[in-house]
Amino acid sequence: MRFIIGKDRKQSALFPVSLEESIGVENEVRAIDLFVNSLDLEKMGFKVCFPEGGRPAYHPAVLLKLFIYGYLNRIRSSRNLEKECRRNIEMMWLIEELSPDHNTIANFRKDNPDAIKRVFRATVQLAKNFNLIGGKIIAGDGTKLRAQNSKKNNFNTKKIDRHLQYIDHKLEQYTKDLASADGEVEREEAQKNIKLHSSRKEGYEKLQQQLKETGEPQISASDPESRQMVIRGNTTEVAYNVQSTVDAKHCIPIDYEVTNQNDKKAMGAMVRRAKSILGTTDFTALFDKGYYTGSELGIVQGLGIKALVAIPDQASTAPDCNYNVQNFTYDQQNDTYTCPEGYQLTTNGKLYLKYRGTSNQTEFKQYRTKACKSCPVKNLCTKAKNGKVVERNTFTPMYEQNRKNVEEDPELYLRRQAIVEHPFGTIKRQWGFDHILSKKGKKRASADVGFIFIAYNLKRILCLMGKKGFREVYAQLVICLFILKETYKAILTTFYPTDPVNLIFCPDPGSNLKRLILVHNWR
C-alpha cells in the first residue's frame, strides 16, 4: 500500500517561507489583528505611555491580541499562552514573534477589567454596524461559573459556630490531658495540640468578626467575593453569577455583569443598560421566574419597556384553588375586589407595613367583606374565622401588568431559553469555560468573563458573516473599523501594502453624513 510521504526534516529550502505566506487569507487571526489595530486602546483605558528606564513594556495591543486568540482557541492560562508564543505559528504571526512571560500576561488581564469591558462593547458595536443586532427582543439570564474557592473554605455564621464548638471541646479535652500527663512526651504532645487548636480558633474568630463588620451572610477564604450558590436543585457551588443580556436576532450578547448575588434584584439594572446600548426603549425583554420581583418590574415598566417575566407557581392560599386571590377581579376606579361569587371586597384605605428582611418593607391595603361570614362556599375560600382578607401592595399593579403581557403573547416568552441559553451553552459546554480562572474578587473575575464574551462575539460575527465568503467579510470589517477609528490610511498601509485600494466618499441619501466605500481589487 502506498502512503503520503512527508518532507525530510533535514532538507534545506532555497526560498524559506515567510510567516505572512504561512497564514492563509481566510485565517481568523487576520480578523483579530485587524480588529485590535482598529481600536483606540488609550481611550479604552489601556496604559499606552510608560516612563523611560528599565526593560521596555509590551504594547497593550500585543497582549490583547494574545488573549483574544487564546480564548478563541480555549487557552486561558497565562503559562499556556506563554508556551503558544514560542510554538504556535499563528500566534507568532499575530504578535510578530514576541514572547511575553506568563507574569506579564497574567498582570495584563488582572489590571484591565474596565478596559476589557470596553473592548467587549466594541464587538457589540461591530455587530450593530453589520446589522446583526435586531434590537427588538432581548432575553436576560444568569449562569453560575465556579470560583477558585472550595466549599470547605466558604463560611457562614452557623458553620463558624460549629467549628468553634468543636475546637472548644478539643481544647477542653487537651487541657485535661495536660493536667493528667505523667511523662514529658505526653505533656509536649498535649501542649502542641492546644497551640494548634488555639491558632485555628483565632482564625475562625477573625472570620466571625469580619462577617459582623461587613454584614455579609457568608465569606470565602480563597476568593473573598465569591459566594456559595444553588446551581440546580439541592446542588450548590462556590461561584459567581454572570448576568448577560442577549439580542434575539442572532443570539449575540450585548451586555454582561459579574455578580455574587442571585437573580432577584438584577433585572432593572440589566434592562437599563440594554436601553443605553440599544439607544431605544422600543424592545421587549424576556426573563425567567427568578427575576419575578415587584420592585424590578416597576423599574422596567417605569422605563417604558415591555417585559415578559415568567410567573412562578404560587402556593394555594384557599382550600379550593378556584378561590385564590388571582381569581378575584380588581376594579381600579372604585378600588374594590369582586370575588368569584360576586361579593365586593372593600378597603378602609389604611396602609400597613410588611417587613421582608432588615431593610425591605412593603406597604399594602387590606380588602374584606361582611358577606363572607354567611357565604355558602366559605369553607372552599378560606379557613379564617372572620372571613377572607385580600392584600394589595404597592407592586401589585406591576405584577398585573406583567401577567397581562404574558397572557397577550404566550408564544413570545417561549423563545427566551433558545435566545439566552445559546451563548451559555457554547461557552460552558462546548468551550469548557464553566469556571472563573482568576481569584481575588469580582473585578478580576470580570476580566476573565470579558475575554470569554469578546471571543464569543467575534466568533459569532465571523461565522454569520462568513456565509457570504470570508473575503467579502474581511472587506466589510475594514470599512466598519475604519469608520470607528478614522485612521484608515495607516491601516491600509499595514494590510494592503501592494494591492490597489480606492477610498471614495459619497453622500448618503437623506443624510448630511458621508459614506465610506472601499473598492478593493482582491487577487
Image: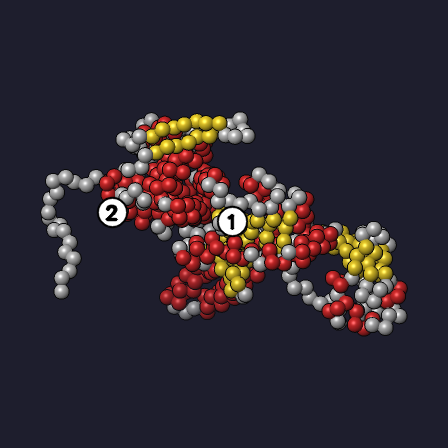
The answer to which of 213 and 147 lies nearer the viewer is 147
Residue drawn at x 11%, y 40% as measured from the top left? 14
Q: Which residue is mark 2?
A: 87
Can residue 56 be seen at all in this image of the molecule?
no
Where's residue 273, x and y in %? Answer: 57, 42
Q: Is residue 327 above or below residue 522?
A: below
- Provide the secondary structure element on which disc 1 rests: loop
- Quick check: 135 left or right of 181? right
Q: Is residue 108 above or below residue 393?
A: above
First in sequence: mark 1 vs mark 2: 2
Where's residue 31, x and y in %? Answer: 36, 41
Q: Amino acid at mark 2?
A: Arg
Q: Residues within 10 Å of mark 2 (few under 14, many from 20)?
A: few
- Provide the secondary structure element on which disc 2 rests: helix
Q: Is residue 68 above or below residue 481?
A: below
Can residue 470 be seen at all in this image of the molecule?
yes
Question: In what quadrant of the picture does the C terminus appear?
Answer: top left
Residue drawn at x 81%, y 55% as measured from the top left? 331
Mark 1 → mark 2, Cα distance in angstroms: 39 Å
Q: Quadrant of residue 274?
A: top right
Q: Which residue is mark 1?
A: 249
Q: Amino acid at mark 1?
A: Lys
